């Protein structure tokens, strides 16, 4: 049977199961295809599973978030919260991030650290995309950075890898599945609207993941870990967002 036919079969299976009282069956189908999100256990768990599994199956792996023209860039780009008070972060900020290094480790062949200058030497990508906060505001900005995929290729991701986890200098953290991690628009961004990233927008480097809501775009990055399980990180829900009631998967 072709891949398309089996995908269609699964999608109608998911829809039928969700429509009838068979939510648990839908979850079982998603499970068979390895599409259970890490926050599937709570009261909204089956809903989260249906959202994640159906988006991953229905949308092309290569679908791109819309990119805009320069003239669409917003006049006001709000900063959501002050930069971390963390002493180490404040020292890096004061020193222009000259001593800052991004650590990349976990299920990789060559655990590495990268300076800001090193990241800026890699082939850059610039994209003008919409950032949507779950609180109901949004803005369009131009982001420049190195595709995460470029860095993942450099460190050599092991085949068991299932997630990439992002740790900043504050208590926030998040993770992406490998599809989102390898996606061409997923950037380690160090520039915004032609300038270095302002502190409040996530200096020196933030994640830009324009196919998902604002909160997945982790600012003030300190380290990145490739893993096959999220169970032992935080409360085991895949990010800090589900710990306070938001979905791990925030596709838009
Ligand atoms: N480290 C870290 N990253 C973060 C946050 C945060 O509090 N800490 N807030 C998130 C939320 S909720 C949003 S909407 C965006 C806001 O990005 P901005 O301040 O550049 O507008 O960053 C996200 N990334
Ligand atoms: Mo947000």
Image (tube, grey):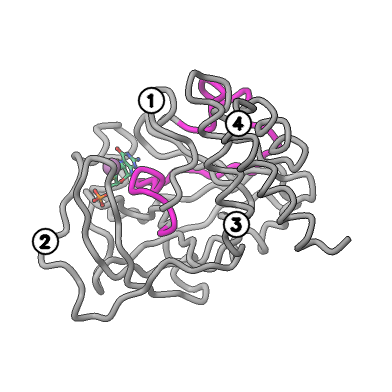
Q: Are marks 2 and 4 in contact (CB under 8 Å)?
A: no
Q: Residue at x 32, y 72 (%)?
A: 128
Residue highlighted by disc 3: 58
Whichever of callouts 2 and 4 sits on the residue coming sooner in the sequence is 4
- Separation of marks 3 and 4 at Cα, in angstroms: 20 Å
Quarter-of-image position of residue 165: top right
Residue 217 inside the magenta-drawn segment: yes
| Picture disc at residue 62 | none
- Separation of marks 1 and 2 at Cα, in angstroms: 28 Å
Whichever of callouts 1 and 4 sits on the residue coming sooner in the sequence is 4
State the extent of the magenta-drawn residues as a range. Answer: 210-239
- Separation of marks 2 and 4 at Cα, in angstroms: 46 Å
- Separation of marks 3 and 2 at Cα, in angstroms: 34 Å
Q: Residue at x 48, y 25 (%)?
A: 44
Quarter-of-image position of residue 21: top right
**Which of the two discs, 1 and 2, sits closer to the camera?**
1
- Separation of marks 1 and 4 at Cα, in angstroms: 26 Å
Whichever of callouts 3 and 4 sits on the residue coming sooner in the sequence is 4
Residue highlighted by disc 2: 76
Residue highlighted by disc 4: 20
Q: Are marks 3 and 2 in contact (CB under 8 Å)?
A: no
Quarter, ligand 1:
top left
- Label 2 Cα crowd, 10 Å radius (few <14 / some 14-19 / many 20+): few
Q: Residue placed farthest to the right in the image?
A: 1
């Amino acid at each position: 049977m072709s891949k398309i036919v089996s995908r269609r079969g699964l999608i109608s299976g998911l829809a039928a199961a969700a429509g009838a009282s068979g939510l648990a069956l839908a979850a079982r189908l998603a499970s068979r295809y390895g599409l259970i999100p890490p926050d599937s256990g709570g009261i909204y768990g089956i809903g989260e599973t249906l959202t994640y599994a159906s988006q991953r199956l229905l949308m092309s792996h290569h679908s791109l978030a819309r990119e805009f023209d320069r003239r669409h860039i917003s006049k006001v780009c709000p900063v959501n919260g002050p930069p971390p008070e963390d002493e180490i972060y404040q020292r890096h900020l004061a020193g222009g991030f000259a001593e800052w290094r991004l650590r990349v480790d976990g299920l990789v062949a060559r655990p590495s650290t990268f300076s800001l200058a090193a990241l800026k030497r890699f082939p850059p990508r610039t994209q003008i995309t919409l950032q949507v906060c779950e609180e109901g505001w949004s803005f369009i900005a131009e982001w420049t950075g190195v595709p995460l995929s470029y860095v993942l290729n450099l460190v050599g991701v092991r085949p068991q890898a299932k997630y990439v986890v992002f740790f900043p200098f504050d208590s926030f953290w998040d993770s992406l599945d490998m599809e989102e991690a390898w996606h061409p628009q997923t950037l380690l961004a160090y520039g915004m609207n032609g300038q270095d990233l302002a502190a409040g927008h996530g200096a020196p480097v933030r994640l830009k993941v324009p196919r998902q809501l604002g909160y997945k775009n982790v600012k003030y990055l300190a380290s990145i870990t490739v893993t096959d399980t999220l169970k032992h990180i935080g409360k085991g829900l895949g990010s800090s967002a589900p710990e306070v009631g938001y979905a791990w998967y925030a596709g838009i």
